[in-house]
Amino acid sequence: MPEIKIKGGKRLSGELCIQGAKNSVLPVLAGTLLCDGECIVHNCPEISDVDISLKILNFLGCGCKREGNTVRVDTSGMNNDEIPDSLMREMRSSVVFLGAILGRTGKAVISNPGGCELGPRPIDIHLSSLEKMGVSIKEEHGLLYCTAENGLKGADIYLSFPSVGATENIILAAALAKGKTVIHNAAREPEISDLADFLNSAGARIYGCGSDYIEVYGVERLNSTQHTIIPDRIVAATYMAAAAVTGGDITLCNVMPSHMVSTLSVFRESGCIIDPHGKSIVFKSPERLKRVPTVRSLVYPGFPTDAGPIIIAMLTVANGTSVFVENIFESRYKYTDELKRFGAKIKTEGKVAVVEGVERLSATAGKCTDLRGGAALILAALAAEGESEIGEIQHILRGYEDITGNLLRIGADIKLD
Ligand code: EPZ
């Protein structure tokens, strides 16, 4: 696997268009399984998590065609309801295909995705919700055999935690189920509303997404449809932070400022000037970033956990000490050991990371531990004096389309080597 090489200290400036949201396109691609015929998905990012999703759809017997940022999925040939362990292992979030396969065929076999680099990530909420909809689930040798003998039926479901994936899986299973499904304490992320918009454009009856109370009235069938994926709010935050750590300024187009209120407020607190205009943001960084006393990750519309590594990397060069509290995942600080190799002063204890800002980071060789942790290393390398090398970049390529090309376009001295 190649490495990313960066000569830091260059001020970034220019304009970037933001890719479609990874965490929206994955459930939408799963949702195509519920539609008859061919669906067309626009603004689909060219990232490896999408490649894996298309591999899964192919394995299930669907025809998939990618034309740049447009993907066509024809599910008329679907002839399988099992996702092989190899593909499940490649992408933990493939669990979101479970609800769609069940919704289409009434049965599914997947391997238990288990934990990941962010800590144990059970799917107990997914499974208990699907059982309420009439699915029986047997686990044997790490495989989950799921069947809905009499078809899926609507249910009244309360989520013990507003899980994004579980909310999506229930919506996907409920769209063609018999009767009404209600989700109490549902996740409110914009990606869930995007999934509902896609399914409703195909004839589904899903109401209340964006709130914690969602109703789905099952319908007989869904037609083929076209859909454009919303912009990726975490990728947008990443490029803003890249400008911020280099004292630069950028204009982002194809963004949704209304999806980023909590994130923009933290950038403003650190002294950045943010001017949202419709679907673009004009971003200017201060001479020196200010510390942000406390940032807490929360479920939407709180500060997004995925932007945690991005903000922490940015605050390593702020003036003063900032505190970050990670409330969503159990161990999301592995990447901070790599940040310390750049000279960052970070102490972590359980959910808390204390970041003491330094004047300047110094170039080094770092290794990505996960997707957003990898993006944090790129930010550190952009801020550091000298040439850095970043390895294990497959983590970054899962969620960032052409990150080296984009950073090059706004003045970074960066190459894939
Ligand atoms: C989605 O993951 C995103 N992934 C994550 O983005 C994001 O960090 C997360 O939501 C929170 O916003 C995709 O959408 C593909 P959860 P998901 O279910 O659905 C616990 C990125 O960087 N939990 O809301 O897996 C779980 O262990 C990725 O793009 C259970 O205990 O998140 C975790 O601690 C990383 N049981 C917490 O809830 C369950 O059945 C949040 O999980 C489900 C979840």
Image (cartoon, helix red, strand yellow):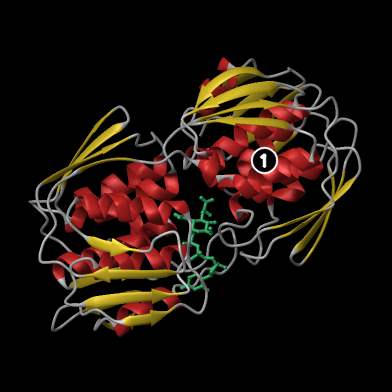
Res 106 → quadrant: bottom left
- Percent x, y for residue 105? 14, 68
Residue drawn at x 59%, y 23% is 251
Identify residue for label 1. 376
CB at disc 1 and ligand 1 closer than 8 Å = no
Position above or below: 256 against 110: above
Please indicate, yes or no, whether residue 142 appears anywhere in the rendered image: no
Mark 1 residue type: Ala
- Percent x, y for residue 381? 72, 30
Res 415 → quadrant: top right
Residue 141 vs residue 101, the one in the foreground: 101
Residue drawn at x 36%, y 50% is 194
- Percent x, y for residue 189? 48, 56
SS of the residue under disc 1: helix
Residue drawn at x 19%, y 70% is 218
Estimate how packed mark 1 is, as few (under 14), some (14 to 19) or many (20 or more) residues with alpha carbons within 10 Å: many
- Percent x, y for residue 30? 28, 55
Q: Is residue 112 toward the left or the right of residue 335 in the image?
A: left
Tally of marks: 1
Position above or below: 385 against 123: above
Quarter of the image where the C terminus is located: top right
Residue 385 vs residue 176, the one in the foreground: 176
Q: Is residue 148 toward the left or the right of residue 128 in the image?
A: left
Please indicate, yes or no, whether residue 409 appears anywhere in the rendered image: yes
Position above or below: 147 against 357: below
